Image (cartoon, coloured by chain):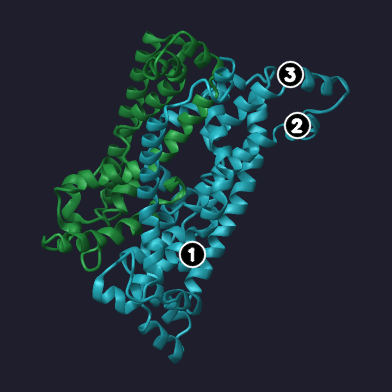
Amino acid sequence: MNARLKHHHFNRLTPFWDFVVTTILIIAALLTLMPVVLVVIISFSSADSIAMNGYRFIPSGWSFEAYRAVLKSGKQILDSYIVTIAHTTLGTISSLTVMSMFAFALSQKKFKARRFLTFFTFFTMLFSGGLVPSYIINVRYLNLYDNFLIYILPSLVSAYHVIILRTFIITTIPDTMIEAGKIDGASDFTVFVKIVLPLFKPGLATIALFNVVGRWNEWFTGMLYISNPKLIPLQTMLTKIQQNIDFLKQSIGSTVGSEEMLEALKRMPSDSTRMATTIISVLPVMLIYPFFQRYFIKGLTIGSIKG
Amino acid sequence: MPNFLSMAVVAIIVFAFLSADHGYLNNIMETLGYSRKNWYLERKPWPFFFIIINAWKNVGFSSVVYLASISGISPEYYEAAVLDGAKKIQQAKYITLPFLKPMISILLIMSIGGIFRGDFGLFYLVTQNNGRLYPVSDVLDTYIYRAMTTLNNTGMATAAGLYQSVVSFICVLIANKIVAMIEPENAMF
């Protein structure tokens, strides 16, 4: 009897149901994975195979041609990679700096404007002016069209993230610690850097990851505010080559234009290149995501606690 | 897992399936003896496509979120239930669901607020902004975007945007009120 009450045993499924549930979940997982696998395979399929049989899970011929073509003529891809990386790192760092300080201010009870500012922040989560007013402000008044700062400034503070950070400070960092620091004569800023930040790391890590993935995947800003190909991020580039694979070729043709390269471009297998570009652009996120997924979930559970 | 893929990538994945020339779906159709179709011109199946794509992208993540809150429930409750002879379904109904209530209510309020916001990426990129599909794919967000960029109808776009904000805001307030009436402590504000 006692053995049955051991932690893992008391609530076991019968072997039959265990098998059924596991099978269903495995099938669901495979179905989820399948589309991504298909894209990977297409990127490695030879052009002949695609022309003859269409996209297949088992192509009649394999080739690295697409990746070679991308590497050889990847001026646009390189530019976009740089833009995306710059957007992700600079954006995340600046946003974390501003948001964590803001969240700290909002978490302090003696801060007078606290209630008003919290409401002010929260309100933007529920109500916004919409696309057109933000476009007009960004373009006419802030002059951000075709400007790298468009990636940084408008997305500097996310109301949702500030609320999560504030809740995190309130629930995990005891007031007494902050007061103790004050009594020792530390200024607010010293308290923030010396006491709050070290305890704050898990919360920051979560928000940093939200930011990194969100910014890496951002394509709308690039589509709306950017026309200079040198400033187009990866994801926007993907939407462009999705509509028109020639986008890659055009920009190369105009910037380099050597005979050999144009020849290479003509032979560029457009279908598999499109898929290869996709794979190259999601690879970094794909590699880091599984390791950091738990932080995401932590962030969501923190966010759901009211403060 | 597909949650970290951007809609730009999802659009390309969908294209691998639906493309008229080489698409995987058309391959299957052909082997089964049906004729090939240009899926990007067919209106009828798109509502299903949207649902499938959205589910594919989001179900995994949502279940992980719920899993996180379920694993926060102390196993002792289940242990006690088993001792009292409760079946699996009863455990789910009387232990798991009540513990998930706060999470479910917050997600519910948020998604009700989102009713008037479409997933712009899903409806714009995945359909390749195809005019033939507008009757089934045009949501407020894509309309606003189009009114602003291609139709040059800024006034209309602004009005539609404001309307969207106001209505969503009212929806959130109502949903929150209803949740507050049933279970005051689960309301968002």
For the C terminus of chain A, give its image quadrant: top right
Which residue lies at the image location 50% right of the left edge and 47% below the top edge?
A: A214
- State the separation of the CA atoms marked 1 and 3: 47 Å
Please identify, in this view, whether the residue under mark 2 or under mark 3 is nearer the observer. 3
Residue at the spot of label 1: A280
Q: Earlier in the sequence, mark 2 or mark 1?
A: 2
Q: Quadrant of residue A199?
A: top right
Secondary element under disc 2, as helix, strand or loop, is: helix
Which residue type does callout 3 highlight?
Asp
Please identify, in this view, whether the residue under mark 2 or under mark 1 is nearer the observer. 1
Q: Residue furthest bottom?
A: A259
- State the separation of the CA atoms marked 2 and 1: 40 Å
Which residue type does callout 2 highlight?
Phe
Q: Are marks 2 and 3 on the same chain?
A: yes
| Front-most of residues B65 and A10 | A10
Which residue type does callout 1 highlight?
Ile
Name the colour assigned to chain B in the rendering: green
Name the colour assigned to chain A in the rendering: cyan
| Above or below, comparing residue A149 to residue A99 in the picture | below
Secondary element under disc 3, as helix, strand or loop, is: helix
Which chain does the numbered disc 1 sit on? A
Residue at the spot of label 2: A192
